Image (cartoon, grey):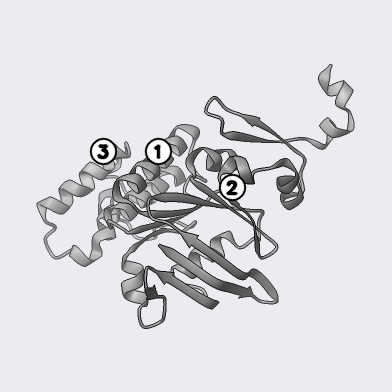
Amino acid sequence: MLRLENLTIQRGTQKVADRINLNLEQGKIYSILGPNGAGKSSMLKTIFGEVAYQGHIYYGTELLSRRSLLSWRKRIGYMPQDTQVEASLTALEVILLGRLDALHMHVGDELLREAAEMMEKLNIAHLAHKDVMRLSGGQRQMVMFAQVLLRNPQMLMLDEPVSALDMHHQINLLEHVCDYTRRNNLITLMVLHDLSLAAQFSDCIILLGEGKIQGLGPARQVLQPELISKLYKVDIEILYDCNGSPVIRPLRKSYKQNPRENKA
C-alpha cells in the first residue's frame, strides 16, 4: 500500500496540495483528474522524490526519505509528460535502458527476448531498429511506456500517457495498463485529462482542485455535473456508455444560451 499523510506541496506562493491524506491499494488503478494547475503532475513528481514536500509518504512500512531515494525509485515505473529523447538511439535501445542496472557490454539473450516480447504486445515491434528521434510523438510515447514496463516495477506512475496518441493507441495502451496492473498486483497512478477515458479505465478517481481532494471513489460517484462544472468552469452533460461508465460531454456556451435553437 502507498500512503500519503498530510502531504503538502508548495509551489511559490501557491499550495498545490494542502494536507492530503490518501491510501492506494495494490492491484488497483487510480486516475488523478483536475483542471490545469490543480497539482496532478506535482503529486506524481513528489511521490517519485523530485519535489520538496511536507508530510510523510510510505510504501508499506518504508518511509520516503533522501537516504532511501535510490531504492525507493527502483520500485517505480515512472513515465513523465516529457518523453523527449535527445540521444540518437533505436527504439529497442531506448527500451533496454529500462533495465540499465542489468546492462553490460553484451546484452543477454533473455533481456533481448523480454524487450522484443514487450514491443510485440504493444504493437510497436516494427519500430525496433528505427531512430527514436525520427519517431512521431505518439510512437515515442509507446516506446517509453515499453521501457517503463521492462523495469518490472511494483508501482506505475504515468503522467498523461495517452496525450499524443490516437484513439486506437489510447485504448491499446490503457488496456495494457489494466492487464499489467492486475497480473502483477501493482499500484497504478495515472494523470489523465480525458475524464471519459479515466472513467472507463480506473478503479478509483482522485479529483483535485484548490489544493484539496474534491472527490474520491468510483467514476460514477465522483464525476457529478455540479462538481465537474465548478472545478473546470464549463457546462457539461453526462451520458453513460453501454457498460454504464460516465461519458463527460462539455457544452458550448451557445447551447445554454439558445436551447430552443439547438434542438431545432
Q: Amino acid at mark 2?
A: His
Label 2 element class: loop
Dot 1 corresponds to which residue? 175
Q: Position of residue 224 (x, y in %)?
A: 69, 42
Disc number for residue 32: none
Label 3 element class: helix
Residue at 33% across, 51% down: 185
Identify which residue, 224 or 132, lies in the foreground.
224
Q: Position of residue 73 (x, y in %)?
A: 36, 69
Dot 3 corresponds to which residue? 120
Identify which residue, 233 or 164, lies in the foreground.
233
Q: Residues within 10 Å of mark 1 (few under 14, many from 20)?
A: few
Q: Residues within 10 Å of mark 2 (few under 14, many from 20)?
A: some
Q: Amino acid at mark 3?
A: Glu
Q: Position of residue 64 (x, y in %)?
A: 41, 76
In the rendered image, is residue 53 in sight? Answer: no
Number of numbered callouts drawn = 3
The answer to whether 27 appears left or right of 14 in the picture is: left
**Image quarter (top left, top right, bottom left or bottom right) of the C terminus:** top right
